[in-house]
Image (cartoon, rainbow, N blue to C red):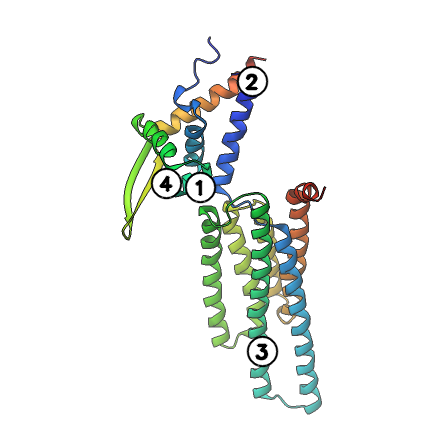
């Protein structure tokens, strides 16, 4: 065997170790599409909030039913944004996996989902508790903190850069705790802006070459 | 010293090398996942797994999920040691035989 063959063997080993333990099909474009859905959602939420405060100021009294309706609409909007973001993310990731000839659903994908779902489920239950106790102002920072921790937790099983996104989301959530009524803006930064920046960086770092090759 | 003396003959097959690489970084992997990752046929993979097991590099655990068999494989400490030795030998070769 020549040196060339031995080098080939070593790179085979590296590739197998990485491919079997990390889900590498996560696409940067997923991040960008999730970020755009979050920003669109934030814009709609802002309009609803502005309208609500306008009604409050013109009538001069706090309308309990109006507030409950606003709360309900915002929760539904949140779920809708999440579903749109997940669908976009799944689509771009599926596309990347297919291009690279990798399976989309294997043990690495399972690892990512389980490890992201555990902290998110804890966060979801926690937020349920906050809403139950009428602590709405704490919802936005809690979302950011638990989402950040979920990303940190799952970064062991996918692109290592996810860890930095997770750290930033967590910090942003904690800062948000000190600016409680600005939750919407922190949401827009955390779920919108950070996702778009992260997605663009990841696309640039891991996918640019591949997609240029497939065009030419 | 013979530069290739430390290479382990067992790991000369690419499939066996692949199995060991995967098991180095995963606690327990089942047959189907190994097959999917290595892109080999059942029979081929089974015979390579047998060789590794006979040499004491693999722990085999036969189980069931419902009625379907689910056989999982894990690396033994002997296997881990042997594989690391093989990697060191490979590295040594590339560095010092130029």
Query: Looking at this view, is B88 or B37 the one in front?
Result: B37
Sequence-wise, which precedes: disc 4 or disc 1? 4
Q: Comparing marks 3 and 2, which lies closer to the viewer?
A: 2
Would you call the spot at circle 2 few (<14 residues within 10 Å), some (14-19), or many (20 or more)?
some
Residue drawn at point x = 53 percent, y = 48 percent: A155
Residue B42 visible in the displayed image: yes
- Please state which of residues A142 and A116 is positioned toward the viewer in this rendering: A116
Query: Looking at this view, is B63 or A161 the one in front?
Result: B63
Q: Check the picture and name the quadrant holding the C terminus of chain A.
A: top right
Q: Position of residue A141 (x, y in %)?
A: 57, 65
Residue B31's label in the rendered image is 4
- Indicate whether A3 appears above or below A19: above
Say which element carries label 2: helix
Of discs 1 and 3, which sits in the foreground?
1
* Chain of the residue under label 1: B
Disc 1: which residue: B36
Do the CB atoms of the residues marked 1 and 3 lie less than 8 Å apart? no
Please, what secondary structure does the residue beneath circle 1 have?
helix
Protein chain holding label 4: B
Q: Quadrant of residue B30?
A: top left
> Eyeballing the image, is A7 above or below B29?
above
Q: Are marks 3 and 2 on the same chain?
A: yes
Residue under numbered circle 2: A3
| Circle 3 residue | A73
Reading the chain from its start, which is encountered first: label 3 or label 2?
2
Q: Are marks 2 and 4 on the same chain?
A: no
Question: Neighbour class for label 4 at 10 Å: few (<14), some, many (≥20)?
Answer: some
Q: Residue at x 42, y 26 (%)?
A: B83
- Tell me which chain the residue with mark 2 is part of: A
């Amino acid at each position: 065997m020549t040196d060339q063959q031995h080098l080939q063997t070593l790179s085979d080993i590296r590739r197998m170790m990485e491919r079997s333990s990390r889900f590498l099909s996560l696409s940067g474009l997923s991040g960008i599409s999730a970020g755009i859905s979050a920003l669109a959602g934030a814009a709609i939420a802002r309009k609803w909030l502005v309208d609500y405060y306008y009604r409050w100021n013109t009538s001069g009294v706090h309308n309990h039913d109006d507030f409950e309706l606003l709360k309900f609409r915002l929760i539904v909007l949140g779920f809708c944004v999440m579903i749109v973001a997940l669908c976009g993310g799944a689509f771009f990731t599926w596309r990347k996996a297919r291009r690279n000839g990798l399976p989309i659903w294997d043990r690495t994908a399972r690892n990512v989902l389980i490890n992201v779902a555990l902290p998110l489920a804890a966060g979801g239950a926690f937020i349920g508790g906050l809403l139950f106790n009428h602590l709405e102002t704490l919802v936005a920072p809690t979302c950011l903190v638990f989402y950040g921790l979920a990303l940190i937790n799952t970064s062991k099983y996918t692109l290592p850069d996810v860890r930095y996104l997770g750290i930033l989301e967590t910090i942003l959530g904690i800062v948000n705790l000190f600016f409680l009524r600005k939750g919407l803006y922190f949401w827009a930064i955390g779920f919108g802006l950070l996702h778009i920046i992260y997605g663009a960086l990841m696309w640039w770092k891991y996918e640019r070459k591949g997609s240029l090759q497939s065009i030419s | 010293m013979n530069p290739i003396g430390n290479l382990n003959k067992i790991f000369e097959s690419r499939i066996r090398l692949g199995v060991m690489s995967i098991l180095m970084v995963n606690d327990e992997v089942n047959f189907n996942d190994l097959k999917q990752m290595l892109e080999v046929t059942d029979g081929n993979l089974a015979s390579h797994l047998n060789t590794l097991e006979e040499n004491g590099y693999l722990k085999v655990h036969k189980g069931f999920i419902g009625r379907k068999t689910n056989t999982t494989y894990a690396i033994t400490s002997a296997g881990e040691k042997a594989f690391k030795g093989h990697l060191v030998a490979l590295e040594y070769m590339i560095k010092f035989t130029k």
